[in-house]
Image (cartoon, rainbow, N blue to C red):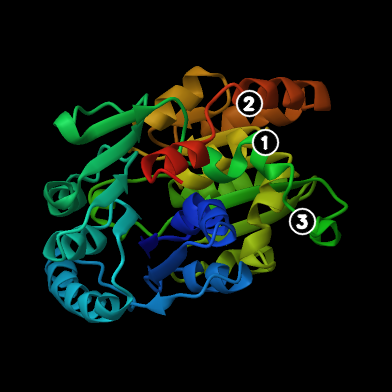
Amino acid sequence: MKLFIDIGHPAHVHYFRHFISKLNAKGHEVMVSARDKDVTLQLLKEYNIPFINRGKGKDNLIGKILYMLKADWFLLKKTRKFAPDAYLSFASPYAAQIAWLRRKPHIAFDDTEHAKIARKFYLPFSKYVYTPACFELDLGKKQKRFNSFMELAYLHPNVIKNEKFDQSIIPEKPYIFIRFVAWTANHDVGQSGMSNDVKKEIVELLKDKYKLLISAEGEFPEEYSQFKVNFPPSEIHNVLKNAALFVGEGATMAVESAFLGTPSIYVNSLNAGTLKEVEKLGLMKSFRNSDGVVDCIREIIEKGDNENEREKRLELISSFEDPNDVLSSAFHV
């Protein structure tokens, strides 16, 4: 089988990298295209996954539509020679539309209810869309639900136990990981997370007792430059796994931290089925705005955490399906 995969975000690298390895080991051919967003290309290089770069994309709606036309034409030319039998992506309009033009099946994965615009451009051109069981929308006959979460494609206990991490990059002093987002995605319009005052309050509260590691999309805030993270992107889950606490506006890292057994606090006006389910399982605290966040941080650090609590959380996580098995079943490999 020849499979084309489009990657639009660093998280998508992790969603599909184990499946790519499995396909390669079985002698199948894989072609990957990727958007130059954040550390996406760097991750692909670190995992030795060959790719073609489809550019940076655009942040405003008109720019996104024009970029879509340009990217479709670029990828159509690139895939003609490769002639894939099928296409795979996480909610990519480009892969879906190219598959439709070439009369080949496109399999989509999606867990983001509020990404309505992207769904209008990929769903009509897709054969199936796989969503976690907790996904709150009914997408019709094309939808197939699975009992798991996208993040478990690389964080399921059965998967991550085989990862090789560099323990030398882990600070000796207990540390807390903080994540800010750029608010430039379509679904971020009109949304918000932590206020600037609360960000400063959190830093002042924690900086003496803990080492702070701060990650941010877009331009890094100058006032927090001394806390800027500095490690290979492929080690992010190693860092999150060993953190005393995660606090952030990004849903992906908040859920990743929770699935790694790390106490996690998510602050964003946006919510989703996955986030609600992870909170319902007791793996994460979720806030729609800054109110109560600092008090929650104080409560968690005063209570502390221990290996027994983490093991209980990991045992719960292991009861869910490995999404790599879902991928294998979808493509009959």
Residue type for callout 3: Phe
The answer to which quarter of the image holds residue 214 is bottom right
Do the CB atoms of the residues marked 2 and 1 lie less than 8 Å apart? yes
Instruction: Using a 10 Å C-alpha cutoff, classify the residue at mark 3 as few (fewer than 14 neighbours), some (14 to 19) or many (20 or more).
Output: some
The percent position of residue 198, horizontal first and vertical second, equals: 51, 44
Q: Which residue occupies the foreground of this view, 234 or 161?
A: 161
Q: Residues within 10 Å of mark 2 (few under 14, many from 20)?
A: some
| Side of 171 relative to 40 (left or right) | right
Quadrant assignment, res 2: bottom left
Look at label 2 and name its amino acid.
Ser
* CA–CA distance in space, label 2 to label 1: 7 Å
The circle on residue 158 is 1
Residue at image point 24% right, 77% down: 80
Question: Residue at image x 17%, y 46%?
Answer: 123
The alpha-carbon separation of the residues under discs 3 and 1 comes to 16 Å
Local crowd at mark 1 within 10 Å, few (<14), some, or many (≥20)? Answer: few
Q: Earlier in the sequence, mark 2 or mark 3?
A: 3
Q: Earlier in the sequence, mark 3 or mark 1?
A: 1
Q: What is the tally of numbered marks visible in this picture?
A: 3
The residue that disc 3 covers is 165
Pick whichever, 98 or 11, lies toward us: 98
Nearer the camera: disc 3 or disc 1: 1
Q: Is residue 271 visible?
A: no
